[in-house]
Image (cartoon, rainbow, N blue to C red):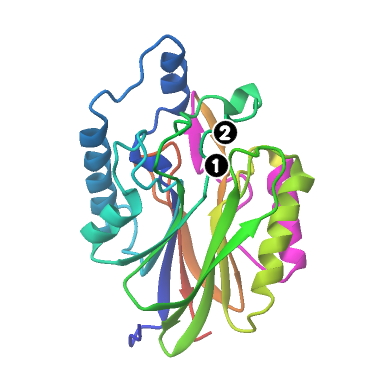
């Protein structure tokens, strides 16, 4: 896509299969046999409509040229059988590329840390899947799936999705990642290193964004330091709240760039489609 304006709006959103913001309370309710929302398909579709409005009416943020989604379920039971990324793309009149996580069928998840056990799991033999997606109002090319190394949660493979976007006569390589929350900081950095190694093959402007699951101050510091050593910068202050639950706030979602100039950035709050808030940034490719 080529425009006279040289500023590109990017956004990243862990949409949590559009089931709503109440991760912890819904997890507690499931333990006593109640799994809200009860009218699942209707609720998910309503949340997608709310998200589409937020990304298009320019009240919470400027309309993005490219939107990266994580936890974008495709026709799972927990998403009410809805292809979340595709339906959101249709409402925004954007093209959609979705990469499934390829969760193994019939394999029960390993026991996780208690604080990660609130999430509703995809049923063992559910024909659907989760994954990451890139939505764009311009042509994306060289779309590439990147499998990230993982070992602490064998039930939930981690991946990234890369694509090249042409904007204002400049090609930008964009990476959308969903980093595993289970390992320690070293395990997360191994996944980031794989991602950055792929990005190093591109010599032009580069964006790495997504849900990095930096759920502690130290993980935020380590992640930022690692990417800065590899030549990336972010306009977000360390500790910016992008996730909330039960009164807690964490900086989980980031946008990093190399060879680009950040003009402005923000968190698009409030938006109650997920337990995360979208993050967005404007970059100037003429600088």
Q: How many marks?
A: 2
User: Is disc 2 in contact with disc 1, using a CB cutoff of under 8 Å?
Assistant: yes
Q: Is residue 68 above or below residue 19?
A: below
Quarter the N terminus occupies: bottom left
Q: Which residue is depicted at the point 27% across and 31% down? A: 40
- Distance Cα–Cα, label 2 vs label 1: 6 Å
Q: Which residue is depicted at the point 53% across and 84% down? A: 287
Residue 68 location in percent, x, y? 44, 59
Q: Which residue is depicted at the point 27% across and 46% down? A: 48
Helix, strand or loop status at disc 2: loop
Can residue 231 be seen here? yes
* Quarter occupied by residue 147: bottom right
Q: Nearer the viewer, residue 177 or 244?
A: 177
Residue 42 location in percent, x, y? 20, 35
Q: Which residue is depicted at the point 43% across and 45% down? A: 129
**Number of residues whose C-alpha sits closer than 10 Å to that of mark 1, classed few (under 14), some (14–19) or many (20 or more):** some
**Number of residues whose C-alpha sits closer than 10 Å to that of mark 2, classed few (under 14), some (14–19) or many (20 or more):** few
Can residue 270 be seen here? no
* Quarter occupied by residue 137: bottom left
Q: Which residue is mark 1?
A: 104
Q: Is residue 274 above or below residue 3?
A: above
Residue 36 location in percent, x, y? 33, 22
Q: Nearer the viewer, residue 176 or 205?
A: 176
* Quarter occupied by residue 93: bottom left
Q: Is residue 231 magenta?
A: yes
The magenta region covers 218-246
Q: Which residue is mark 2?
A: 107
Q: Is residue 18 magenta?
A: no
Helix, strand or loop status at disc 1: loop
**Is residue 38 left or right of 141 when viewed as pictured?**
left
Q: Residue furthest top?
A: 32
């Amino acid at each position: 896509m080529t425009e006279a304006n040289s500023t590109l709006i990017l956004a990243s959103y862990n949409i949590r299969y559009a089931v709503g913001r109440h991760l912890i309370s819904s997890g507690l309710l499931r333990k006593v046999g109640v799994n809200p929302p009860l009218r699942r398909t209707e609720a998910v579709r309503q949340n997608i409509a709310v998200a589409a409005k937020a990304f298009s009416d320019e009240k919470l943020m400027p309309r993005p040229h490219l939107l990266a989604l994580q936890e974008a379920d495709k026709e799972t039971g927990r998403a009410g059988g809805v292809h979340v990324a595709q339906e959101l793309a249709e409402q925004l009149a954007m093209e959609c590329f979705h990469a499934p996580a390829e969760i193994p069928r019939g394999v029960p998840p390993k026991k996780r840390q208690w604080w990660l056990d609130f999430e509703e799991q995809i049923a063992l033999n559910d024909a659907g899947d989760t994954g990451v997606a890139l939505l764009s109002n311009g042509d994306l090319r060289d779309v590439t799936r990147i499998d990230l190394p993982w070992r602490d949660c064998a039930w939930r493979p981690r991946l990234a999705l890369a694509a090249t976007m042409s904007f204002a006569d400049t090609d930008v390589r964009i990476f959308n990642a969903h980093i595993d929350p289970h390992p320690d900081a070293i395990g997360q950095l191994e996944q980031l290193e794989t991602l950055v190694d792929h990005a190093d093959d591109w010599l032009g402007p580069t964006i790495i964004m997504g849900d990095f699951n930096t759920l502690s101050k130290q993980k935020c510091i380590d992640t930022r330091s690692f990417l800065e050593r590899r030549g990336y910068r972010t306009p977000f202050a360390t500790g910016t709240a992008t996730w909330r639950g039960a009164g807690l706030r964490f900086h989980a979602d980031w946008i990093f760039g190399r060879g680009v100039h950040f003009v402005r950035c923000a968190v698009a709050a409030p938006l109650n489609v997920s337990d995360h808030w979208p993050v967005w940034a404007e970059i100037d490719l003429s600088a």
